[in-house]
Structure formats: structure tokens, C-alpha cells
Amino acid sequence: MDSLKAKISEVIKKLYGVEVPVEFAPVPAEIEGDYSCNVAMRLAKAAGKAPRDIAAEIIAELPTDYEYTVAGPGFINIAVSGKALAGQLSAAWTDDYGYNQSGAGKTAVSEFPSTNMAKPYSVGHLRPGTQGWAAKRILEANGWKVITDNHLGDAGTPFGIWATGFKRSGKSIDEVTIYDLGEIYIQMKADMKAEEAAGEHALADSAQDWLLKLEAGDAEATELSERFNKISLDHIHGVMKRMNLSTDYELGESFFVERGKALVQKYLDEGVFVKNEDGSVICPLDEFGIEVPMLVLKSNGAALYATTDLGCLDYRLHEWKADRLIYAVGAEQKFYFEQLFAVAKKLGWNAEMQHVWFGTIDQVGPDGKREKMSSRKGVVLLEAMLDDAEKRVRENFAEAELADEDVRRIATGAIKYSDFIADRKTGILYDPDKIFALTGQSGPFCQYACVRMRRILEKNADFAGADFGDYDFAAEKGVLQKLLEFPALVAGVAENLEAHRIAGYCFELAQEMNRYYENAPISTAEPATKAARLWLVARAATVLERGLDLLGIEIPEKM
RNA sequence: GCACCCGUAGCUCAGCGGAUUAGAGCACUAGUCUUCGGAACUAGGUGUCACAGGUUCGAAUCCUGUCGGGUGUACCA
């Protein structure tokens, strides 16, 4: 089809002397043709002619390998035979079909899930993980080298709050679990809020003290921090393993404290940053149209998120030589990242910096209204969600006698896919019955389609690769068109990291296959037909698996 | 106040630079099949695409305004 596009461009240039982007779109089922092209309408104004007349003129110049019709207001509809489509797929097929090398030689860093070590892994950290992982896989499919880094929240105020609350609780460090620590943290946050409202600040001061002690290398603070971090990290690793997520690095905030502070001093000396009377340091951003300057050092001299993030940014750009930085973080931090990226620009740091933000996870509140999930309202923990998902899978697939690993694959497949149904910018409504749905547009539906294809291929393995003569591929047109779309889709989502378009594609392909089986029997077909159909199924299976892989969704052995 | 995001079917959401009769899933109803794996497939929609203007041969899509919801707005992360 690419050669036809080029030919159309050529004809347009010859006839009208202009260049117009030529794209093909699928045609609605009721209308004759397989692809439609709207160039005639785009040309109408420049050419000063009616779109339908232009379409006719263009068609007269085109090769006769295809059938053309002028439809509607001036679409050129192109009819392609199934055989021609099969020929195209065959010609385009390689071992890495769907992938490309547009990012070859370039390095990206994808930051996720940036877990807050103060609390147990909650549903709130679900999206950073799924979206950040998809960003990594999508870029890799486009030839990028991708470094992943879990930017752990292991420094800053949370430690101070933790330490203060922990000492107050009187608990033993050898007994506390991540759940205890999470409760302590949440209680402390509430108490501090009440304290602030009362005009007091004993707890806040204590938290700041602990923080300063830690940064100064105080022995007790260091030990507490290490113990807390180990408990938290073990927990995070456990949950990530169940989700089949991992990162190459876990350079937490604490790793960047010194680097960040040194940078602040450096740019303070150079006059880029400004010191306030109270001792805090800011970076003015007026020239970027941002009225609120970025605070890069607290008045007491302690680092804050911006300090460590600046150090981190510097590290990624200059140590890892990154060309592109991806931050999979919620929408609440949009303004923060606008500031951060502006600071980087001001410092002359050049790289593509992208905040891959996403909407909140909402729930239905007691009043029946949709509201944001939050710790105070009783947050759903990811471990509990995974347990629930696995329980539902076991119940629903009781007859299949699934292996534990397959149960896990299906459960996480359902959870992950639900995150990719909508555009990442759209908030998600947490509804367990919908997330764990096994029918309709869901992860299990797609996984099932893969398993089914694999089984068909296995059972008919002896026919694979056999000659399929002059089979017409008439029944396969829908699937073939879908398969031919895949490479452009993978390339198309690389810029804005729109994983939901991959998810939609996987569903459509799975659905297309289900329709296909209805009227195209395989095992009972004539040898040539059978070989042809197995050839198609093998390719569809590969594409569907690759699509799901980009979303981090695994395929179970059986289900 | 200002900035950003959003408003599409009963519900949850697609609709990528404007284009053929605005789609999918869920739910509901009725069918199909002696099932290569039925968790399937087929059929069934009277939607002021929040509202009002504008640009255009053509607007859910672009522009302006209004209303409604969400998020953010320096010592939290």
C-alpha cells in the first residue's frame, strides 16, 4: 500500500502541483472497498474543483492492480483482494515484524513506579507501574535503549514523619510491618494537620529534626532509616514481582541529596538561583511564563523533592547520557514537572523531557458520587487487590485447573488491561467487578485469544509451512488488514506513549480472530486451505502476543 | 483569582492532524452452533457529542464565550 500512497502523491503533484499527505483509512463495512483516501477533499480548495471530479481525475492515473470507486463527498475507495493483502503481509513479515529502529542509538530513562516508601503499595501506585512499564516497552519496540529507575521516596519529610511517629508509638523495630509503618505515617499526617490548625508545630519540628539528623549522618537516624527502608523495599519487591514489574535501578531520592545540594550551590554561585532572606533558595522562571518560582532548597537548608530531582535529572542526562526522560507520575504533579523542566531548560540541559501523566483512580463514595481514592477514605492496597483478583480467577476457571503462575498471569492481565482501556489522561473508576471482568474488552479476552491460537497451531503443527497454492484469502481480509496496521501503530504511539491504542488494537485483533473462526474452519479444511489458514493464525498469534507484551501482559499456558 | 484537564448511549469509555450513516464494552432482549477451545459469534440504539456563537463545501474534532466537574497554584511528594 505504501507504493500506492507514493503513486497517489506523485499523481497529485503532477496534476495539481501541490503536496498533500496521503493516508488510507478503513472503510465502513456497508460500503464497497477496503481502504479510503480523502485527498480529493483536501485538494478541493487548492484545485478549485469539486472533490468528486478531482477523485475521478486521480483514479484515471492510478495503476490498475486495484479497483477504485468514488464514494460519498469524494472519497477514493480502494478495493484490494485478500490475496493481495496476504502478499503484502508476506512481503513485510520479518522476525521482528511490528518493531522498528527509529530510536536506534538513543537512550531513554523511564521512571516508575516511584513508590512512596512510607506506606504499603496501594492502588494509587498501580498506574505509575503499568504506564511506566508500557512506556519502556513501547520505546524499546521503536529501537530505543531504555533504562528504568524506581525513584524511591526514601528521603525527605516522610522519613522524619515516620521516625517521629515510630518513636511515639513505642513499637519495636524488629516487629513492625509495612502495614504498621503505613498506619503510623497516616496517623502522623493527620495529627500534624490538626497541630498546624492549632497553631502549634512540635511534631513538625521533630520530623524536621530527624530529617536533618539523617542528612548529617546521625547514627540512630541512619539505622532507623535503613531498617524502615528494608521493610518497605522487601514489600515493594514482593508486590512488583507479582505484577511482573522490575526496574534496572532503584536510585532513591537519598542517592541524589548531595548531588542536588551541590547543584543548588553551584547555580547560586553563578547567580542563576536566588537566595531568599529566610535562607531558602529559588529558581525564578518568569521567562518561561511561570510566575511561581521553583523552590530548590528549604529555608532550614534541607533538601526537598525539587533538590533531589534536580540532582537526579543531572545524573540521568550526564551519567547515563539520556536523550529522553519519561516520568510516569500522576496528573497532580503536572505543574511541578512544568517547573522542573523549565529549570532544566534554564540550566541549558537539553533532552526531551516528558511527564507521562495520568488521571486519578476514583471510587464511588458513600454518597454515591465519584471521588478520588485517598488514604484517609480507606485506600485499597495492591496486595489485597491482587489477592482478590486471583481468587476470582480461580473461581471462574475452576475447571481448567490452572497452575498458580497462570492464575497470576490472568489476574494481573485483567488488572493491567483495565488500566489501558481508556486514554491514560482519563481517570479510572475503581470497580472490582469491571476490572476483573473476563468477557468483552478485557485482558483475559485477549489472553484467551492467544491461548486458543497457540493450541490450534499445536494441534495442526504437521500442516505448518505446507504449500497453500493459489488460496484466495477471501475470508481472511479482515484479519490481514488488522495485521498490516500493526507496525504503523507501534511507531505511532512512540511519541505520546498512548498505550491505550495498543490495548484497543489487541482487543480488535482478538475479536477479529473470533469472528474468523466462525466461518473459516481450519482442521477440517482442504490441505492447501488449511496450510494457508495456519500461516495466518501463526502471524496473528505473534502480533497479538507482541501487542500484549508492550502492555506488560503475559500469556498463560492455558486458561 | 489564575493555570491545566474534562463534559460523547442507562453505566464505563474510544473516536490520532476536520470527512462517507458518531463507535466499543458492560447491562438488557432474541437468535446461532452435534463447539478445530462457546469465556464465542449474529441481530436489536429516537445519543440536542454540556450550552451558545464563529471558521469551513463539511465540526464531537479547530477558535471565542458561558455553564458544570476535577486537579494544581514554593519550604508535601
Image: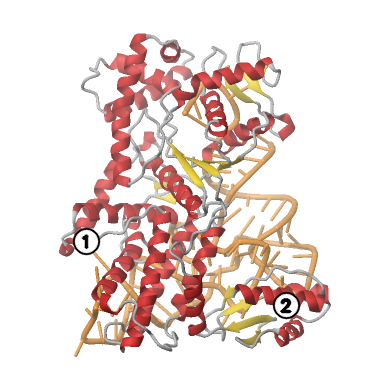
Pointer 1 chain: A
Percent x, y of residue A39: 70, 74
Percent x, y of residue B15: 57, 64
Q: A387 left or right of B52?
A: left
- Looking at the image, which is closer to me, A448 or A539? A539
Disc 1 and disc 2 in contact, CB within 8 angstroms: no
- Looking at the image, which is closer to me, A26 or A85? A85
Q: How is the image coloured?
A: secondary structure
> On the image, numbered disc 1 is attached to which residue?
A396
Residue depicted at x 31% and y 14%: A168
Q: Amino acid at mark 2?
A: Ala
Where residue B54 sits, quadrant-wise, is: bottom right
Percent x, y of residue A488: 55, 64
**Mark carried by residue A323:** none
> Relative to A76, is A162 above or below?
above
Residue depicted at x 32% and y 33%: A120
Q: Amino acid at mark 1?
A: Asn
Q: A62 left or right of B13?
A: right
> On the image, numbered disc 2 is attached to which residue?
A40
